[in-house]
């Protein structure tokens, strides 16, 4: 066996980060760098975790060619043992997620309201790591179920980490942390049968809803198109709870945080979301990855709603109740900065999986409100990290470590990575001059809230939390008629998956309070003989002013930026038409992907080969925002007998997408049963197609499917 010789000069030239096993430890890096293969000199020598060079990575150690494996084989044992321990417990909620690095830049100072530097220093770029997630499914579940999305941002501020751990919906299902385990148990797969995965359409979830009327407002959001985002880049984000901002004088102002996507808010339609679960399990993850790789960096505005204690007292609801939102019409949004995600993680496990968010992580100048859900969250996240990440030192994992200096007397514990020096690991001490000390001037101060003069200790739900239906009604009635129809249909879909008749009926009973006409529509959709009676409501339901800002359809941005158009080609296609269309689409910011029966591409009429991004059978139109086809009549005829091609058009039409299809595609349109409308154009009508592709063909929907 030839021992690999060492080469100091080659090791010296190589940058430490290029080493495949580079870690934070310089010692480790240095040792590994000593060993360099002679042949070619590019590959460092494979070693064990102890730095022992490995000669053979193919065969385990045996006493004879066909003999048993020897226990002595420490290389095999170490490799297999490490592999056996590669997984850590997945998050009990929000297990499925995708993250990215970026920065937050403040454009408007909140100096009058807070001392937090991240919210007062205009122009400074604070590094962030953002993780988006679904809630109910496991880590390997699909990206597009009907589900709430997590929107968690870790700001590495100069005064410590600030985690804004929000969702893409501004309210929550429950009012008190005490009910969170029940809610999560009810929505996740049922414990005896272990299905359904990543879906709320089952008995236990709706049973819980039917018995917990406080869920009704968020249920209306969950049944809206908000839970079917087109992309993580087209989602809004919300801090949900009221937080406090504290200024230099110690005054408190309540704040609600909102993220608004630069691309505008946009969703898919339900049938499309369902089919995406087959077309691309990683639809959102891939979209985020591809956008960042292409330099098309996802961006959001950060906006705040600010209000005082006195103003809050006059709201027609209690802002400490997380099932309530503060309408923009009541407290306008002020944009204070932007977040850009510009770097995909180097390693999914090390960063996206190990990132540990916690709403209790706030720098001085930001403080909590008494929202009872937030108060419970302040405990839960640190607690869950201890078991998920294996001990109290998870803050030392690079993705979790603050990027500002940090010093304290916390010592030892599993996986301790730091090597503290000196005798002093306590405070106060007089033996060392440089030990950390608390600072009245710079340290975190809690807002000194005056007690609200209540009745004393007790398991008490405030009276001001009693109205469960008025905002649910406000949200439903603020939607456009089509969005209302989507919600009614979603309720019918979900409740049709509920096998227990009394649960279905009880939910419809609650809907009577939300909107009697909605209850009628859902009852009809379920085939109930009559609308069940509404349960008693603790408070009379009020007609609050409507909030059109809560719609999606009207607020979709007329742009092709961030949108992806598929062009179907086959042998004989007119390459000039394809090029003209492609250039025009790319000019206005769209991403264009070529689809062809074979991934190797198609030979154009002039003999040139146009390579494809995707094979037709594996690239259904569900993954595009609009589609075009440039085909000869002969190929159109041939493809009209190909199910994947017919579905390509049928689904694009059914999902309300613009279609550019010339004469050559007529046989396909016929086979797909498409009756051309304003959203079906000739590929030569480039500007017409661009205009149509900027939106969905909403007028088409009522002609296509029965909505409840
Ligand atoms: Fe969470 N939540 N949550 N949650 N949550 C977790 O923490 C919890 C709530 C949210 O990308 C867990 O590290 C309780 C509201 C996001 O890593 C856990 C309560 C909102 C993420 C936990 C809530 C959220 C989590 C699971 C009610 C929106 C994913 C793993 C009192 C404002 C963060 C983990 C990531 C994750 C507890 C309610 C958002 C168990 C007890 C409300 C985005 O600690």
Image (cartoon, rainbow, N blue to C red):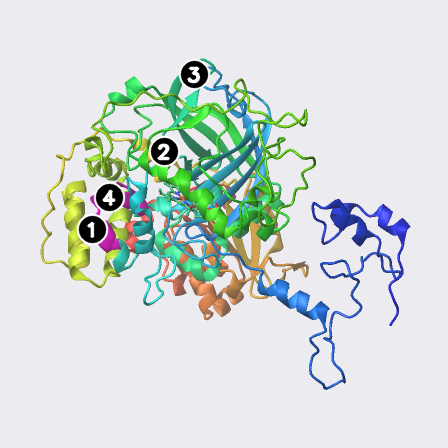
Residue assigned mark 3: 250
Kindly report the distance in space between the C-alpha atoms of the residues bearing marks 3 and 2. Answer: 21 Å
Q: Main secondary structure of the magenta part?
A: helix
Q: What percent of the width, then of the height, locates residue 77?
A: 67, 69
Along the line of sight, which residue is nearer the eye, 332 or 656? 332
Residue at left offset 26%, top offset 23%:
452
The kind of secondary structure element at disc 3 is: loop
Give me the disc on residue 241: 2
Instruction: Kindly state the secondary structure of the residue where label 2 is placed.
Output: loop
Distance of label 2 from label 4 (alpha carbons): 18 Å
Residue with the mark numbered 1: 210
Q: Earlier in the sequence, mark 2 or mark 1?
A: 1
- What is the magenta range? 206-222
Point out residue 173 in the picture as x, y percentages from the top left corner.
30, 43
Pointers 4 and 3 in contact (CB under 8 A)?
no
Q: Nearer the viewer, residue 307 or 449?
A: 449
Q: Quick check: is 641 in the magenta stretch?
A: no
């Amino acid at each position: 066996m030839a021992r690999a010789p060492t080469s100091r000069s080659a090791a010296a030239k190589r940058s430490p980060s290029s080493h495949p096993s580079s870690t934070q430890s310089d010692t480790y890096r240095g040792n590994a760098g000593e060993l360099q293969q002679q042949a070619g000199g590019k590959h460092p020598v494979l070693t064990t975790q102890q730095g022992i060079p490995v000669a053979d990575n193919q065969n385990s150690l045996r006493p004879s060619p066909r003999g048993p494996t020897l226990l002595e084989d420490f290389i095999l044992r170490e490799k297999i043992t490490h592999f056996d321990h590669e997984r850590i417990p997945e998050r009990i909620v929000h297990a499925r997620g995708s993250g990215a690095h970026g920065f937050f830049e403040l454009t408007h100072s909140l100096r009058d309201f807070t001392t937090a530097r991240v919210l007062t220093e205009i122009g400074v770029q604070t590094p962030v790591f953002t993780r988006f997630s679904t809630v109910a499914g496991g880590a390997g579940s699909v990206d597009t179920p009907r589900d709430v999305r997590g929107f968690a941002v870790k700001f590495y501020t100069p005064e410590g980490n600030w985690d804004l751990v929000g969702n893409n919906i501004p309210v929550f299902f429950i009012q008190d942390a005490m009910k969170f385990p029940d809610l999560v148990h009810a929505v996740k797969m049922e414990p005896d049968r272990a299905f359904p995965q990543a879906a709320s359409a089952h008995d236990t979830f709706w049973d819980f809803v039917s018995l917990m009327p406080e869920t009704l407002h968020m249920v209306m959001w969950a049944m809206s198109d908000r839970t079917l985002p087109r992309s993580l880049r087209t989602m809004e984000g919300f801090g949900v709870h009221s937080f406090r901002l504290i200024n230099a004088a110690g005054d408190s102002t309540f704040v609600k945080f909102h993220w608004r996507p630069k691309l505008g808010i946009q969703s898919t339609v339900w049938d499309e979301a369902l089919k995406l679960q087959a077309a691309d399990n990683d639809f959102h993850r891939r979209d985020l990855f591809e956008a960042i790789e292409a330099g098309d960096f996802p961006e959001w505005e950060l906006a705040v709603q600010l209000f005082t204690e006195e103003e809050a007292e006059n709201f027609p609801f209690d802002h400490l109740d997380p099932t309530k939102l503060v309408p923009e019409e009541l407290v306008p949004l002020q944009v204070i900065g932007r977040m850009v995600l510009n770097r995909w993680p180097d390693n999914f496990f090390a960063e996206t999986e190990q990132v540990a968010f916690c709403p209790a992580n706030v720098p001085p100048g930001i403080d909590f409100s008494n929202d009872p859900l937030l108060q419970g969250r302040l405990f839960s996240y640190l607690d869950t990290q201890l078991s998920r990440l294996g001990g109290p030192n998870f803050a030392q994992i690079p993705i979790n470590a603050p990027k500002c200096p940090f010093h304290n007397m916390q010592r030892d514990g599993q996986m301790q990575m730091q090597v503290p020096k000196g005798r002093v690991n306590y405070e106060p001490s007089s033996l060392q001059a440089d030990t950390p000390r608390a600072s009245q001037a710079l340290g975190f101060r809690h807002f000194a809230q005056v007690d609200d003069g209540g009745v004393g200790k007790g398991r008490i739900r405030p009276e001001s939390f009693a109205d469960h239906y008025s905002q649910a009604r406000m949200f439903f009635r603020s939607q456009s008629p089509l969005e209302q129809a989507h919600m009614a249909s979603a309720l019918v879909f979900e409740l049709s998956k509920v096998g227990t008749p009394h649960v279905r009926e009880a939910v419809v009973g609650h809907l009577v309070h939300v909107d009697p006409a909605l209850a009628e529509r859902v009852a009809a959709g379920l085939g109930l003989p009559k609308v069940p009676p509404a349960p008693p409501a603790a408070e009379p339901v009020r007609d609050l002013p409507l909030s059109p800002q809560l719609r999606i359809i009207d607020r979709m941005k007329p742009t092709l930026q961030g949108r992806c158009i598929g062009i179907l080609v086959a042998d004989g296609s007119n390459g000039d038409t394809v090029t003209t269309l492609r250039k025009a689409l790319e000019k206005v910011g769209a991403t264009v992907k070529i689809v062809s029966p074979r991934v190797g591409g198609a030979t154009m009429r002039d003999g040139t080969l146009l390579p494809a991004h995707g094979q037709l059978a594996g690239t259904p139109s569900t993954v595009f925002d609009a589609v075009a086809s440039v085909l000869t009549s002969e190929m159109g005829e041939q493809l009209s007998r190909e199910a994947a091609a017919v579905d390509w058009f049928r689904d694009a039409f059914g999902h309300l997408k613009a279609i550019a299809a010339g004469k050559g595609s007529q046989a396909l349109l016929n086979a797909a049963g498409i009756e051309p409308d304003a959203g079906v154009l000739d590929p030569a009508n480039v500007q017409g197609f661009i205009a149509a592709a900027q939106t969905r063909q909403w007028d088409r929907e009522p002609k296509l499917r029965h909505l409840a």
